[in-house]
Amino acid sequence: MSAPPRSSSWGPLQGVKVVSCSTAQAGTVPYMLMADLGADVIKIEVPEGGDGSRHMTVLPGMPSTFFETNNRGVKSVTLNLKSPEGRAILHKLVAKADIFGQNFRPGAAEKNGFGYEELRKINPKLVYVSISGYGTKGPNGHLPGTDSMAQALGGIAEAYSNPGLPMRTGIASVADESCAMLAFGGALAALTHARATGQGQKIELSLLGAVIRLMGWTFTTTMWRNKNPVTGQARITGTAQRAGISASFNDRHGKPLVFQLTGPENWHDAMEGLGFAERIKAAGFENLGVIIDNDEKRIELLALLDSLFATGTRDEWVAKLRGSDIVSAPINTLLEASNDPDVLANGYVTHVDYPKFGKKLKVHGTPWQFSETPAKPGIAPELGEHNDAILSELGYTSAEVADLRARKII
């Protein structure tokens, strides 16, 4: 029996309509991902300036990397939501939408005419996504939030810290991106419910809550032990009878690699494959479990491994470990990651045409592989690029659009 013909369409979210009054990263990435997957996403921006991130991280002669990464594939409509006419247009868009998103500080949406209670009257099936910094129920729920604030409060600074050195937040926006992915999944879960029952709902997420979730089982272990984890070069897990380790080391040129072991069998295979077995046994570490709950032994073993890995090259060590069926990889810089063969082969990084600049640029690809409705990365819109088309769809005439523009409503 032959396989059914493949669909020529792209994106499994075709037909889904989204309106977003969001800025920054956590508030825009969920809808950018939806646009990648075929959703019709309208981004509302203020006239004469738009989203402030249009002017961030601008390289000479290039668009903002921040805005481009977070807003590709969406449509831009400018509205002055402080005006009755602007709010009326927003309400008309919401009436036809499946999902609405905003990430203003608590209370601002209600003040400006796009709070949940107001919009649900217009569209009872609406999925309303609200993102805040701290969550809305705690003592700081009224405060604005940023990625670094959530990293600081959520524990990730410790997760990547070194003993004896100050904890610091990192340059990758892990709180923003984690929150965005949770918002993406939560919105689509609520949309499934809305389409089955006709009942919309409000979903609240926060940057802080996202980091707490991101800490995963390590967070659970910390709570159950009521003790901070050992951080730094190695992550030690298990018991004295069945210990595991994930650790990083530098080669003779200072290039780092990592390997991870889940049990004593892995430890023996790894040391044999690397040619370290005799030295390890002579030093009393034939059983990895001796380092569990013993800081002195842990420090001694890591120092020995440091000296052994410093005798060869990273590529050699990784090849030997993988040859022994041990999980191992080079530790990439961001630039190295963008050129990693697996990253490129799987389309996690791709190239997109930018007609305005007359060339293709390297961008994020997509983390999904859909067999029938593949994702299609786009480019970010010019400010107000879709005003005329969208307002025309809502029934506004050319003269009315021109009047709205003249009065700076759009």
Image (tube, rainbow, N blue to C red):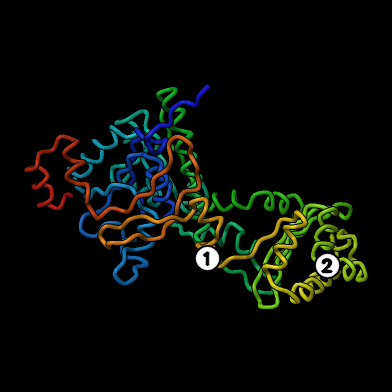
Q: Residues within 10 Å of mark 2 (few under 14, many from 20)?
A: some
Q: Which mark is residue 275?
A: 2
**Outermost residue to the front:** 1
Instruction: Depth check: give the residue in front, 399 or 137.
Output: 399
* Left or right of 35 in this view: 393: left
For mark 2, give the secondary structure: loop
Image coordinates of residue 226 in percent, x first then y, are 75, 54
Image coordinates of residue 315 in percent, x first then y, are 67, 67
Q: Mark 1 belongs to which amino acid?
A: Leu
CA distance for labels 1 and 2: 31 Å
Task: Please say if 298 is above or below 374.
Answer: below
Q: Mark 2 belongs to which amino acid?
A: Gly
**Outermost residue to the left:** 399
- Identity of the residue drawn at 40% across and 38% down: 11
**Which image quadrant is residue 233 in?**
bottom right
* Left or right of 265 in this view: 46: left
- Identity of the residue drawn at 33% across and 56% down: 353
- Identity of the residue drawn at 9% across and 42% down: 398
**Which image quadrant is residue 356 in?**
bottom left
